[in-house]
């Protein structure tokens, strides 16, 4: 499922125009992005938590030449599924 599919599903379930549904999705993703950039974690009950993880710099290697090369530290987004999402994925109906 991609953003267009999600927009269509939201519009259908909420009985709103696709333009409004797309706008709501953009607002939600922007709010999550802004919170993560500011170092906050975002928790959506029964769905999961978005957080930021810091990866330290290290010395890697060039796969072609095997020469050592520095890899800089980076911040990466991390998602951890909540109990409700895990239960939904593992329900045995």
Image: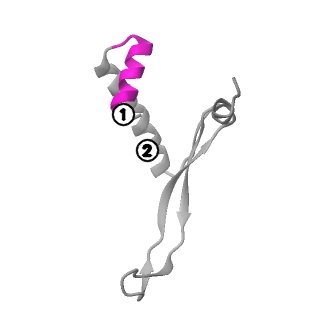
Q: Position of residue 53 (x, y in %)?
A: 55, 58
Residue 39's label in the rendered image is none
Reply above or below: 11 against 23.
above
Query: Who is closer to the viewer here, 53 or 84?
Result: 84
Task: Determine the secondary structure under disc 2.
Answer: helix
**Which residue corresponds to mark 1?**
3
Q: Position of residue 9 (x, y in %)?
A: 41, 21
Is residue 7 within the magenta segment?
Answer: yes
Would residue 17 be found to the left or right of residue 34 on screen? left
Task: Determine the secondary structure under disc 1.
Answer: helix
Reply above or below: 32 against 13.
below
Is residue 63 within the magenta segment?
Answer: no
Q: Residue at x 65, y 31 (%)?
A: 46
In which quadrant is the N terminus drawn? Answer: top left
Neighbour tally class for label 2: few under 14, some 14-19, many 20 plus, Cα within 10 Å: few
Which stretch is magenta?
2-16
Q: Position of residue 60 (x, y in %)?
A: 47, 80
First in sequence, mark 2 or 1: give its number.
Answer: 1
**Which residue corresponds to mark 2?**
34
């Amino acid at each position: 499922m991609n953003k267009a599919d999600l927009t269509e599903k939201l519009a259908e379930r909420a009985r709103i125009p696709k333009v409004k549904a797309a706008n709501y999705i953009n607002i939600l993703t922007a709010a999550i992005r802004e919170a993560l950039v500011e170092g906050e974690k975002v928790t959506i009950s029964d769905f999961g938590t978005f957080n930021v993880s810091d990866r330290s710099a290290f010395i890697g290697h060039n796969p072609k030449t095997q020469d050592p090369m520095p890899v800089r530290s980076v911040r990466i987004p991390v998602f951890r599924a909540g109990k409700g999402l895990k239960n939904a994925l593992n329900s045995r109906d």
